[in-house]
């Protein structure tokens, strides 16, 4: 899996290791894997850490060749890597920083495509497999900002359906996990509690998401229990997009009226 050292990535690595999987955890060159390796101690599975820059086809090819030579096969690909830290520069189209836009698309869409491009032949050799691409709820609705990020993740959703359609006959499934707002140390430290509460108010399950929520969804889509599911976008967002946008405000009015 790519993006293995982040919050969602490390949680997914731990979950898969606990299930007994051999996990190739890939991250950017220069990443310190110490914490990830320590978290793997005592797990049923086996951890292998490697470096990759998914925006570079040469780097992606080297990673997949290493996976083949060291492990002989590839059954699951979790495309978790992506640029997520540009919100402060990701505005509306008129005010778009084109260089930032290009970087976002190069990593989030092109990088995911490159991983699929070079993983699929290895999966065909292995008799099939499951590809899980990590997207975002921001790909499923519009906003007044983060247009580059949301558009890149919409591209991931579309790419996933094309991969599912083209390679299903080779027993390769391709699905998307679409997280809502997921907690992390950075998010909790920088996002005002009032903004966090707005997200909670709009969730049908009244809490923010945890990295483990995404890890469990990935584990399901990686397993034979999801063997007849492909080309789908699984929203793991507490139901934030499952209701009318007026619901939270109307509920607040009813609550206020009841308190009077």
Image (tube, rainbow, N blue to C red):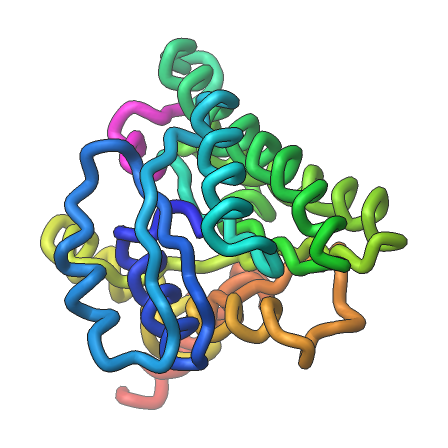
**Membership of 246 in magenta stretch:** no
Which residue occupies 43% across, 72% down?
16
Vertical placement of residue 238 versus 27, above or below: below
In percent of width and height, residue 93 lies at 48, 18
In percent of width and height, residue 67 lies at 49, 47
Vertical placement of residue 185 versus 260, above or below: above
In percent of width and height, residue 237 lies at 48, 66
Image side of residue 170 versus residue 30, left or right: right
Residue closer to the observer: 91 or 125? 125
Range of residues picked out in magenta: 84-91
Image side of residue 89 versus residue 189, left or right: right
Which quadrant of the figure has residue 23? bottom left
- By secondary structure, the bulk of the magenta-drawn segment is best described as loop
Which residue occupies 27% across, 87% down?
260
Residue 203: tell me if it is visible.
no
Residue closer to the observer: 121 or 110? 121
Instruction: Farthest residue to the left: give it.
Output: 189
Which residue occupies 82% across, 47% down?
167
């Amino acid at each position: 899996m790519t993006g293995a050292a982040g919050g969602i990535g490390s949680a997914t690595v731990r979950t898969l290791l606990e299930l007994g999987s051999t996990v190739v955890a890939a991250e950017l060159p220069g990443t310190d894997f110490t914490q990830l390796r320590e978290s793997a101690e005592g797990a049923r599975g086996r951890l292998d850490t490697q470096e990759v820059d998914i925006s570079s086809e040469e780097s992606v090819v080297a990673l997949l060749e290493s996976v083949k030579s060291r492990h002989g096969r590839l059954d699951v690909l979790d495309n978790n890597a992506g640029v997520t830290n540009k919100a402060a520069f990701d505005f509306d189209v008129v005010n778009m920083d084109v260089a930032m836009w290009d970087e976002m698309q190069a990593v989030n869409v092109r990088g995911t495509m490159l991983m699929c491009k070079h993983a699929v032949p290895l999966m065909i050799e292995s008799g099939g497999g499951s590809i899980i691409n990590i997207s975002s709820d921001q790909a499923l609705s519009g906003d007044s900002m983060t247009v580059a990020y949301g558009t890149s993740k919409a591209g991931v959703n579309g790419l996933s359906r094309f991969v599912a359609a083209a390679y299903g006959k080779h027993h390769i499934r391709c699905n998307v996990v679409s997280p809502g707002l997921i907690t992390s140390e950075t998010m909790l430290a920088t996002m005002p509690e009032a903004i966090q509460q707005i997200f909670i108010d709009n969730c049908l399950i009244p809490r923010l998401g945890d990295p483990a929520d995404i890890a469990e969804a990935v584990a399901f889509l990686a397993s034979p229990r999801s063997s007849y599911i492909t080309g789908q976008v699984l929203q793991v967002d507490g139901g934030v997009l499952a209701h009318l946008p007026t619901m939270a405000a109307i509920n607040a009015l009813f609550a206020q009226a009841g308190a009077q």
